Image: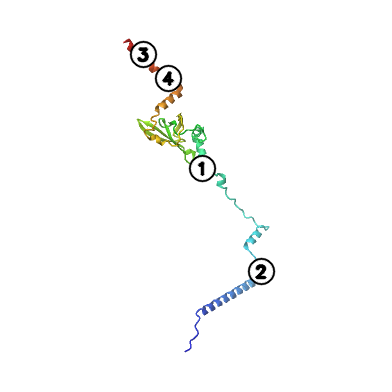
């Protein structure tokens, strides 16, 4: 029994592909010949490119030819980073110049000022829409920008501890005065331990009243003392006469 040779199923496909390629090449040659016969001037006016032709070089060469119209180029916009490298700092300085034109509050809380306000001092804050508030400084909060500086004051009202935050550059704050400075500088920047009963300073109304008397013009406390002593002498004399 003889076996027949195995068939090649891909042979027909390869033959078809070769025939398609041959027909494509013939059609291209015919189209080129027809174009040359119909438009003979194309070969002289537009010669075929050289073997090493690259479009980028041709563009560079034609850029400097005479008689060509120059294409207008719009300049790029101005860089905002170069014009204003730090806009936040400029805006902060502008706001501080409006809220504090004299610079007194800036110097009062500046870290470079040796006489700046520190924790433990007694301040008097005058408000535009209310009575002045006084208290002991527990904390001075300075965040990323100096315009966010705030101070925490503690005082006692009817023997109850009261704390209040004040923005230094707030439009509601009319003025800040240093009533009394702490004799010995605190080792801490935040005196929160003064909230405890054994460390609480208590009410500072007496210190503030004495400060206001001295500022108003003279030792008012001594005058009051003399008046009280005189009245007491009169009472004693009357008692002696009786």
Residue denoted by label 4: 222
Q: Position of residue 18 (x, y in %)?
A: 56, 77
Query: How many residues crowd around disc 2 within 10 Å: few (fewer than 14), some, or many (20 or more)?
Result: few
Is residue 219 or residue 29 the one in the foreground?
A: 219
**Mark 3 secondary-structure assignment:** helix
> Which one is in front, 151 or 36?
151
Mark 4 to mark 3 CA distance (whole Å): 18 Å
The residue under label 1 is 88
Write down the quadrant of residue 225 in the picture: top left
- Residue 163 in view, yes or no: no
Task: Point out the image quarter for the C terminus.
Answer: top left
Q: Marks 4/2: CA distance?
A: 119 Å
Quarter-wise, where is residue 32 in the image? bottom right
**Whether label 1 touches label 4, CB < 8 Å:** no
Q: Residue 69 carries which label?
A: none
Rendered location of residue 217, percent (x, y): 46, 22
Report the mark closest to the observer, 1 or 2.
1
Q: Name the residue under label 2.
A: 43
Mark 3 or 2: in front is 3
Please name the residue that numbered disc 3 is placed on.
234
Q: Where is residue 113 in the image (x, y as percent from the top left)?
A: 51, 33
């Amino acid at each position: 029994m003889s076996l027949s040779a195995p068939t090649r199923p891909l042979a027909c496909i390869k033959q078809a592909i070769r025939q398609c390629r041959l027909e494509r090449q013939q059609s291209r040659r015919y189209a080129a010949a027809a174009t040359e016969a119909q438009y003979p001037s194309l070969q002289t006016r537009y010669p075929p490119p050289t073997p090493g032709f690259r479009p980028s070089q041709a563009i560079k060469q034609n850029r400097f030819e005479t008689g060509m119209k120059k294409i207008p180029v719009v300049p790029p916009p101005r860089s905002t980073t170069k014009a204003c490298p730090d806009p936040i700092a400029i805006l902060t300085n502008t706001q501080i110049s409006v809220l504090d034109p004299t610079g007194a509050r800036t110097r009062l809380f500046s870290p470079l000022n040796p006489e700046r306000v520190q924790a433990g001092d007694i301040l008097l804050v005058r408000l535009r829409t209310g009575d002045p508030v006084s208290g002991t400084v527990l904390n001075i909060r300075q965040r990323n920008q100096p315009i966010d500086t705030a101070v925490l004051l503690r005082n006692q009202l009817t023997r109850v501890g009261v704390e209040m935050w004040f923005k230094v550059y707030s439009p509601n704050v009319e003025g800040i005065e240093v009533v009394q400075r702490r004799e010995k500088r605190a080792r801490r920047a935040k005196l929160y331990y003064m909230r405890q009963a054994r460390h609480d300073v208590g009410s500072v109304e007496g210190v503030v009243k004495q400060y206001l008397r001295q500022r108003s013009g003279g030792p008012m406390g001594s005058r009051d003392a003399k008046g009280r002593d005189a009245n007491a002498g009169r009472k004693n004399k009357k008692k002696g006469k009786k």
